[in-house]
Image: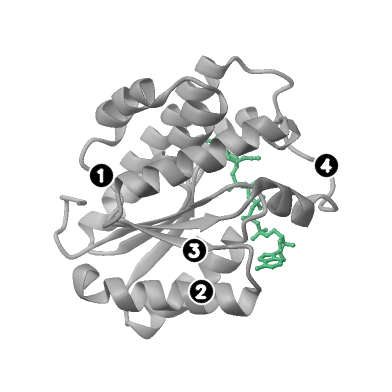
Amino acid sequence: MTSINSKARLITLEGSEGAGKTTALNVICEILQQWDIDFIRTREPGGEPTSEKIRDILLHSEHLHAKTELLLMFAARNEHIENVVKPALAQGKWVISDRYVDASYAYQGGGRKLGFEIVQWMDNFIVADIQADFTILMDIEPEIGLERIKNRGQADRIELESMDFFHRITNAYREKAAENPDRYAVIDASKTIRQVTRSIQLAFIQHRDKLL
Ligand code: Z5A
């Protein structure tokens, strides 16, 4: 759906805490290298200097109101899209983003209970036609994901939320995936790394004709 360069694709990776996005990102990069695709790897919130500063505010402020959080996510996203995503796509490079606008539906719309409607409004305003072509959702029950990251050290502001918050995120992601079955591949992220790797590889094989 990216409209800047019809050949370049925007691929996004989503999931709740500890779903194994880092592992998945490496698998995706290997697949694209095998396909001989020129791509960049980036992330949200962040991906460029101003957005990284906003990420720091988002993750390490003591308190933020839900609407402030939403606005900052989209402020960071706007800089990221204008300075990184659009230029890469215009050069014909694929963009692999560790999280993108679906995370705002899940975390701010679902987790923070702001609802999908307001996120949709921001999505139309900021993201517009720079939509993902293919989204890998690392689907996992929050209890399993949080268990995996519990020994990682200091938790950030969002990771300190309640279990209900994380269940709302998981449900919101599942709702988005069900609404967009052609764009999403839902991976059972609770399986072993080997099984997860295989599922991602299969998802790319199945979508290859649509993407290339
Ligand atoms: N956020 C938001 O609210 N709204 C938005 O619009 C956007 C973001 C864009 C930063 O995201 C925060 O911003 C995030 C959402 C919010 N919430 N928080 N906090 P982030 O992506 O940078 O951070 P993260 O979600 O916290 O990433 P993470 O916790 O590092 O998750 P991960 O990348 O999925 O986990 P991982 O590091 O790949 O794996 C975690 C551990 O599990 C690690 O030890 C692995 O070795 C292990 N692992 C991985 N796979 C497996 C399997 N299959 N089995 C067993 N163990 C495994």
Q: Which mark is residue 154?
A: 4
Q: Provide the residue designation for mark 1.
A: 130
Name the secondary structure under disc 4. loop
- Location of residue 169 by image quarter: top right
Q: What separation in Å lies between label 1 and label 2 (alpha carbons)?
A: 24 Å
Name the secondary structure under disc 3. strand
**Which residue sits at x=81%, y=52%?**
152
Q: Provide the residue designation for mark 2.
A: 27
Q: Position of residue 132 (x, y in %)?
A: 31, 51
Q: What separation in Å lies between label 4 and label 2 (alpha carbons)?
A: 27 Å
Q: Residue type at mark 3: give it.
A: Ile
Q: Position of residue 189 (x, y in %)?
A: 58, 62
Q: Residue type at mark 2: give it.
A: Val
Name the secondary structure under disc 1. loop
Q: Residue type at mark 1: give it.
A: Ile
| Sequence order check, earlier mark of 1 and 2 | 2
Q: Which mark is residue 187?
A: 3
**Which residue sits at x=47%, y=20%?**
114
**Which residue sits at x=84%, y=48%?**
153
Please say if 22 is above or below 144.
below
